[in-house]
Each structure stands twice: as C-alpha cells, then as structure tokens.
Amino acid sequence: MSNSSIKQSNHYLVLEPTSGKRILSAEETLIWLSYQVSLLSQLPNSIKRLTSSQDQAQWLFETCGELEFFPGRKVQWFAIRF
C-alpha cells in the first residue's frame, strides 16, 4: 500500500505479541505508537534525529509498519478499510 493510501486510512489493525490484535483510529494508533516508542531502551537509527516520541511516532506511522524491540519481539500496524 502506498503512503498516500495509508495517510487516507481512518483505521489501523495493531498487532502486539502480548495483547493480540486491535482496531484503532488513526489518532489512537499514533498515541499507541508514541507509547511504544517511549518503551524502547535504544532508538532505531531512523528516528534518533527526532527529539520527541510524538515526532518519532509520526515518522514511523507514515513510513513504516512495524517496530522491533529486539529480535523476535515487534509490534505492527496496518491500514485497513471498512
């Protein structure tokens, strides 16, 4: 899915190893992702240049679909349409 399609989506499927799957709004997904970023002990190189967890979450939200905490432990989010 292209970035323009992702930005137009209103809902996201969020997958977490410990919590399973949830459907969140775009705003809720950004809040969730910001929290996930705050849990990282070491930031990925791609977001180190950004100073706030909100900016880091926004960048990840717009450009990625997963965030890895350590090998084998990652969270994912996917744009969905109803």
Image: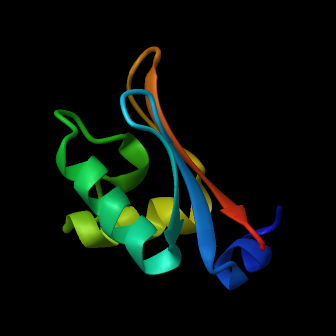
x%, y% of residue 65? Answer: 60, 50
Most distant residue in the bottom direction: 8
Most distant residue in the top direction: 71
The residue lying at 27 percent from left, 41 percent from top is 43
Q: Quadrant of residue 69?
A: top left
Give the camera-side residue of 73 and 60.
73
Seen in the image, is 1 located left or right of residue 43?
right
The residue lying at 51 percent from left, 75 percent from top is 25
Q: Quadrant of residue 67?
A: top left
Give the camera-side residue of 26 and 44.
26
Q: Quadrant of residue 42?
A: top left
The residue lying at 78 percent from left, 76 percent from top is 5
x%, y% of residue 62? Answer: 57, 68
The residue lying at 36 percent from left, 28 percent from top is 18
Seen in the image, is 72 located left or right of residue 62?
left
Disc tally is 0
Q: Is residue 65 above or below residue 54?
A: above
Seen in the image, is 21 located left or right of residue 39?
right
Q: Is residue 76 above or below residue 47?
A: above
x%, y% of residue 1? Answer: 83, 61
Q: Is residue 33 above or below residue 54?
A: above
x%, y% of residue 15? Answer: 52, 41
